[in-house]
Image (spheres, rainbow, N blue to C red):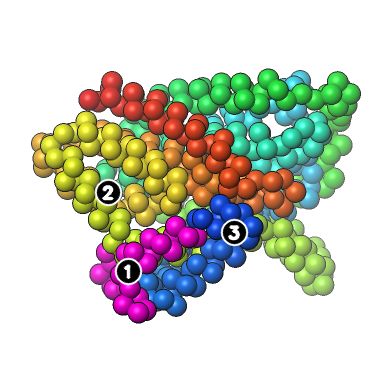
């Protein structure tokens, strides 16, 4: 529980029960899918503050501004870049590379997303690839949902493989003293296996059944991709800024910069380049257009959800669960690893994995003496990483990448609701965790 704020709930209600019920009701209304999720999250956040679960200052502490800034910056870059025709060009080239065959395209989307997420991060990756995915499916006149969900799953799986691919890994690596190479050695092998299995499942589910007409395939294969570029100077500017942003994100630790600073800095530079030659009135039109295309529903949903989850954290529920874990595992490292893996997976699927990982790090550290020191509890760190990162695939609200794709999809008229996503993704997440359990059992226990 935080040292700086003690919740005092109206009518003397128990803070832990109040925060837990508020979170459950919030998710229930999201699942109901009759009210926009941004409205739900913001109303719930307001209730948390008004009721006394948080005060305003504490609520602001709960917002992950780094995530908000990174998302907003990349959305601005994407908004400007797409006006050049670059995504349409990439869509045509991708479809032609896959011979305009939906099954091959489904696999290609996963492979590209998987590898880019490992070296960049999963949120940045889906922001870049989702518009291309939608453009490809429009050209082939096929349903985009299977391709978008495949992209989400691959982004979270690929992000698990490296230290920089997913925020929980960054936290674990920093606090546990684990190197970039350690994550690759211990997690990359099983992550590749998980991705292969997921790709096979998606092929059996959708790849075989999705067909494009011969006419549409021939039309795509005969398209001139270069003709899609409608503003070459803007394209060159966008590519240059994006390349600098990606390189900076890869080397963010050496640069001593946070992802939000890099993304917002890149967005500011590209907006400047986009408006440099225009008069002030034209600049106003350009900037308004750019900011209008930002996925504000996703941004404000995150703001509200971060506050609600922080209320649960401040109430002491996560600390209570962590304490129970220590009591149950005792001196059984294998049992501790299995519990951490599955607990992380399901909590990550239904609440944000960042506060959970933040609480679990000191808990796992406190278990070190019982097992002979910090060097002997490394398997627990890998269980925490695999559970927290892959568990995010389970529901629409499980990871930032999921909601980012949902926002892009809905702005383009593609239904991407909580129930629809979860019905497909949750079973696949459980399969991935079963594979990970077998892996950690054979390798470490």
Q: Position of residue 409 (x, y in %)?
A: 68, 47
How far apart in space, not on screen, are marks 2 and 1 (Cα)? 24 Å
Q: Is mark 3 on a helix, strand or loop?
A: helix
Q: Which of marks 1 and 3 is nearer the N terminus?
A: 1
Q: Earlier in the sequence, mark 2 or mark 3?
A: 3
Relative to 137, 304 lies left or right:
left
The label number, if any, that marks residue 394 in the structure image: none
- The residue nearer to you, when weighing 222 against 371, is 371
Q: How many labels does the image show?
A: 3
Residue 146 seen in the figure: yes
The label number, if any, that marks residue 15 in the structure image: 1
Relative to 237, 70 lies left or right:
left
- In the rendered view, would you say 303 is above or below 383? below
| Quarter of the rendering occupied by the N terminus | bottom left
**Within 10 angstroms of label 2, few (less than 14), some, or many (20 or more) residues?**
some
Identity of the residue drawn at 48% across and 60% down: 25
**Within 10 angstroms of label 1, few (less than 14), some, or many (20 or more) residues?**
many
- In the rendered view, would you say 60 is above or below 123? below
Q: Quadrant of residue 116?
A: top right
Magenta range = 1-26
Q: Name the residue under label 3.
A: 37
**Within 10 angstroms of label 3, few (less than 14), some, or many (20 or more) residues?**
many
How far apart in space, not on screen, are marks 2 and 3 (Cα)? 30 Å
Q: Mark 2 points at which residue?
A: 361
Identity of the residue drawn at 67% across and 58% down: 294
């Amino acid at each position: 529980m935080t040292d700086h704020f003690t919740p005092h709930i109206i009518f003397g209600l128990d803070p832990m029960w109040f925060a837990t019920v508020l979170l459950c009701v919030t998710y229930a209304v999201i699942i109901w899918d009759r009210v926009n999720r941004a409205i739900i999250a913001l109303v719930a956040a307001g209730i948390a503050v008004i009721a006394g679960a948080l005060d305003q200052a504490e609520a602001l502490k709960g917002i992950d501004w780094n995530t908000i800034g990174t998302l907003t910056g990349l959305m601005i870059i994407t908004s400007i870049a797409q006006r050049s025709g670059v995504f349409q060009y990439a869509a045509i080239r991708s479809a032609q590379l896959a011979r305009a065959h939906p099954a091959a395209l489904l696999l290609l989307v996963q492979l590209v997303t998987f590898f880019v997420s490992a070296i960049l991060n999963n949120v940045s990756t889906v922001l870049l690839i989702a518009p291309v995915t939608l453009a490809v499916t429009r050209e082939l006149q096929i349903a985009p949902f299977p391709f978008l969900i495949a992209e989400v799953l691959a982004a979270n799986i690929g992000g698990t493989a490296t230290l920089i691919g997913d925020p929980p890994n960054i936290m674990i690596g920093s606090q546990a003293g684990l190197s970039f190479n350690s994550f690759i050695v211990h997690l990359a092998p099983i992550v590749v296996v998980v991705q292969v299995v997921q790709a096979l499942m998606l092929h059996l589910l959708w790849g075989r059944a999705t067909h494009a007409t011969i006419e549409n395939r021939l039309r795509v294969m005969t398209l001139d991709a270069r003709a899609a570029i409608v503003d070459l100077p803007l394209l060159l500017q966008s590519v240059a800024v994006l390349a600098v942003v990606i390189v900076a994100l890869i080397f963010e630790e050496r640069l001593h910069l946070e992802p939000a600073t890099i993304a917002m800095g890149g967005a500011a530079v590209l907006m400047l380049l986009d408006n440099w030659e225009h008069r002030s009135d034209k600049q106003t039109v350009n900037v308004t257009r750019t900011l209008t295309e930002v996925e504000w529903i996703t941004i404000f949903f995150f703001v509200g959800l971060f506050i609600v989850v922080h209320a649960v954290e401040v109430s002491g529920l996560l600390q209570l669960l962590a304490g129970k874990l220590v009591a149950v595992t005792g001196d059984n490292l294998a049992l501790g690893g299995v519990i951490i893996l599955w607990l992380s997976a399901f909590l990550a699927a239904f609440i944000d994995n960042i506060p959970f990982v933040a609480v679990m790090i000191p808990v796992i550290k406190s278990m070190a003496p019982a097992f002979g020191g910090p060097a002997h509890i490394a398997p627990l760190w890998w269980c925490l990483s695999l559970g927290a990162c892959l568990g995010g695939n389970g529901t629409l609200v499980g990871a930032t990448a999921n909601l980012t794709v949902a926002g892009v999809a809905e702005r383009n008229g593609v239904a991407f609701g909580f129930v629809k996503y979860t019905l497909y993704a949750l079973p696949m997440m459980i399969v991935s965790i079963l594979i990970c359990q077998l892996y950690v059992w054979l390798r470490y226990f």
